[in-house]
């Protein structure tokens, strides 16, 4: 699977996510190309953030 390899790519990916957000909503069909791209990029960002920006959650 492709991964975000550095901060430059992370920031570019976040910028693209911001562009996509206004194009989708709860009524967007699951086969919409913008929603698919948003889902894929969001998963990549989540994986990157889990490693590089971990949340310190205490129970």
Image: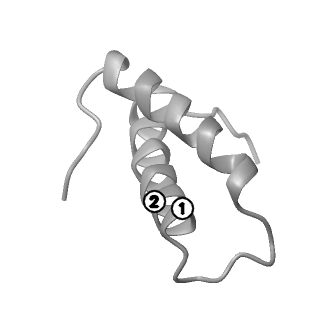
Q: Which residue is drawn at 51% across and 51% down?
A: 42
The quarter of the picture where residue 3 lies is: top left
Front residue of 16 and 50:
16
Which residue occupies the foreground of this view, 29 or 47? 29
Q: Pointer 2 and pointer 1: residues touching (CB < 8 Å)? A: yes
SS type, badge 2 = helix
| 16 vs 2, nearest the viewer | 16
Residue 55 locus on image (x, y percent): 62, 34
What kind of colouring is applied to the model shown?
Answer: one colour
Q: Which residue is drawn at 39% across and 35% down?
A: 51
Q: Mark 2 points at which residue?
A: 37
Q: Is residue 22 left or right of residue 47?
A: right
**Residue 7: x %, y % from top left:** 36, 18
CA gap between label 2 and label 1 equals 5 Å
Above or below — where is 17 with respect to 8? below
Q: Residue 34 carries which label?
A: 1
Residue farthest toward the top in the current orientation of the protein: 8
Label drawn at residue 11: none
**Above-or-below relation of 39 to 27:** above
């Amino acid at each position: 699977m492709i991964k975000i390899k550095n901060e430059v790519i992370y920031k570019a990916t976040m910028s693209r996510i911001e562009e996509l957000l206004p194009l989708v909503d709860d009524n967007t069909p699951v086969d919409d190309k913008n929603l698919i791209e948003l889902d894929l990029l969001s998963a990549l960002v989540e994986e990157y953030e889990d490693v590089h920006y971990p949340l310190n959650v205490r129970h």
